[in-house]
Amino acid sequence: MTKITSSKAQSTKTKVIRTLPALRRWREKFRGKSVALVPTMGALHDGHISLIDAARAANDVVVSSIFVNPVQFNNPDDLARYPRTLEADCQLLEAAGCDVVFAPSVADMYPTPPAL
């Protein structure tokens, strides 16, 4: 079993943003600040948390995306079986000091469905 730890703890709840327009509005508040993005597909592990730690150390604000991208799977069964652990992932990101989780839907990321 993997033990996930972080050198940074955050006392406030990590915000979850679900749409691109909401993310853009949120980003406007941080003009002039450095914002790091740690993209993931969720099912977080120690490697992800180390990236959050590095982003936190080098930037003012840290965002992690959690998006299971259907175009990355050539087998629909693999896509269906991919773990989706948003609540647990958000808890880990909060403990690691991530400021925002961007967790969009497939429809938001691909308004016109991609050919799979």
Image (cartoon, rainbow, N blue to C red):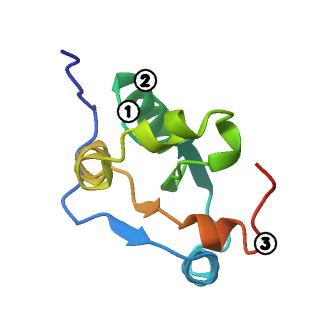
Q: Which mark is residue 90?
A: none
For marks 2 and 3, give the one nearer the viewer: 3
Secondary structure under the numbered disc 2 in the rendered image? helix
Q: Which mark is residue 112?
A: 3
Question: In which quadrant of the rendered view does residue 47 lie?
Answer: top left
**Mark 2–mark 1 CB contact (< 8 Å):** yes
Q: Residue 21: horizontal and vertical position, in percent?
A: 63, 83
> How far apart are the two marked residues, 2 and 3, measured between alpha carbons?
33 Å
Q: Amino acid at mark 1?
A: Ile
> Which amino acid type is marked by label 3?
Thr
Along the viewing direction, whichever of 107 and 37 lies nearer the viewer: 107
The residue lying toward the viewer, choosing from 113 and 67, is: 113
Compared to 15, does 46 lie above or below? above
* Amino acid at the residue labelled 2: Gly
**Residue 79 in the image, given as x and y percentages of width and height:** 52, 41
Identify the residue shown where x is 56% and y is 80%: 29
Percent position (x, y) of residue 53?
41, 35
Q: Secondary structure at mark 1?
A: helix
Judged left or right of residue 39, residue 32 is right
Q: What residue is drawn where x is 60% and y is 74%?
A: 27
Quarter-wise, where is residue 108 in the image? Answer: bottom right
- Residue matched to label 2: 47
Label 3 sits on a secondary structure element that is loop
Q: Earlier in the sequence, mark 2 or mark 3?
A: 2
Mark 3 nearby-residue class (10 Å; few <14, some 14–19, many ≥20): few
Q: Which residue is mark 1?
A: 49
Q: Is residue 12 left or right of residue 115?
A: left
